[in-house]
Image (cartoon, rainbow, N blue to C red):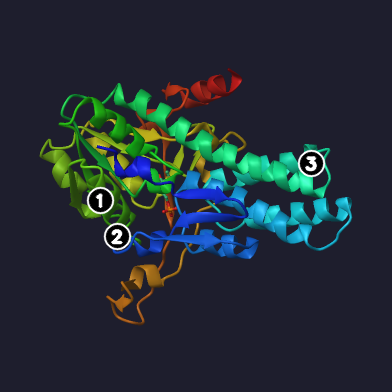
Amino acid sequence: MTEFHSKIKTIQWIDNYSKMVDQTLLPYEFKYINITHGKQMFDAIKNMIVRGAPAIGVAGAHGVVLYALELEKENLSRDEFVKKLIDKADYMATSRPTAVNLMWAVEKQKEVIKNSESDIKGIVEELKQNAIKLEDEDIAINKKIGDYGAEIVPKGAVILTHCNAGALATVGYGTALGVVRSAFANDPTVQVFADETRPRQQGARITTFELTMDGIPTTLITDGMCSYFMKKGIIDMVVVGADRIAANGDTANKIGTYTVAISAKYHNIPFYVAAPLSTIDKSIKTGDEIVIEERSHDEVTHINGKLICAPDVNVINPGFDVTPHELITGIITEKGILRPDYNKSIAEVFAK
Ligand code: MRU
């Protein structure tokens, strides 16, 4: 059987446009849309048509190519083209603030622009090739994360995850769900408990969708239930993704992750983060420096367009929280599993 995840690419560069799964429609409809302009890509990232840290990194890289294609038509000098394109790339990097993969991938495209010795047409071509390279690397990296992670999954484990760090949060295979996929391939008795993940319900809408499509046994729980199942001894380990990891290991991930980590610590359950090295932001010492995205209040006050609370109640909606490094058992990367002291293990992995 070919699994669902290996038949799809969440985001892919095709000739002169970007093709992506519209994740706002899941789980009702699995539909691809084409993004043909830079501003359209900016909005697709901002409005979470594409979401998940590695996927929005690749989307940002595609966005730079789309802006390059637009500027190519403007009859600019090479210098003007480069200057305007760098400005557009910087703008693309502001489409969402927390996941560092976006800034990382845009930076990779800026390096291509700055280092190129080609004419405008040549720069555009180099940007396309670099975007495709980032796509291919993403899948290869996730498979390595999956294989390192699978080594520490006990036989028959029940793995709790929060939000969606799967094939649909990346180009393919997934980070946290990459670990699940590799573990399940070795041991079909592995199963998942998926937190619903309010307010946008990525766990319910996206994680349960992609895992059940791959035949991986999955149980959906609401966010408040995790301690209950941990106390009952049902959860063997937690594996989540990450949007940004500071040099000391503090990890920003979807709001609610911190609560899961505290509960895991209390119940003596290992809590792992699975992420590519591009999610590690060595420029920040601790998680206090991570900008937390503040999202629309409608995400909290409404479900499927329907008001679920008093219309004039006060609302606050941070999209992410930061799990302190002392709650994290290990960080599963494509270069192996990093262990505390993270200041040391992170510095070492980058020095290699
Ligand atoms: O707001 P989103 O859906 O883009 O946030 C994604 C997450 O926070 C995921 O949990 C994730 O771990 C990062 S993507 C692998």
Residue at (60, 19) in percent of width and height: 351
Q: Residue at x 13, y 37 (%)?
A: 234
Mark carried by residue 208: 1
What amino acid is found at the position of numbered circle 1 in the picture? Thr
Residue drawn at x 42%, y 47% as measured from the top left: 169
Q: Helix or strand or loop: what does disc 2 sit on?
A: loop
**Few, some or many C-alpha atoms within 10 Å of disc 3 (few <14, some 14-19, many ≥20)?**
few
Give the CA separation, mark 1 to mark 3.
42 Å
Give the percent coordinates (x, y) of residue 48: 46, 60
Q: Secondary structure at mark 1?
A: helix
Tell me which amino acid carries mark 3. Lys
**Near-viewer residue (158 or 76):** 76
Q: Callout 2: few (<14), some (14-19), or many (20+) C-alpha neighbours within 10 Å?
A: some
Is there CB contact under 8 Å for labels 2 and 1? yes
Residue tagged by mark 3? 114
Q: Which residue is mark 2?
A: 27
Vertical comparison of 309 with 136: above or below: below
Q: CA distance from mark 2 to mark 3?
A: 41 Å
Name the spot of residue 194 as percent of width and height, x first: 24, 47
Q: Position of residue 256 (x, y in %)?
A: 33, 51
Q: Is residue 344 above or below residue 311?
A: above
Q: Earlier in the sequence, mark 1 or mark 3?
A: 3
Quarter of the image for residue 305 reads bottom left
In the rendered image, residue 193, in percent from the top left (x then y), is placed at 21, 44
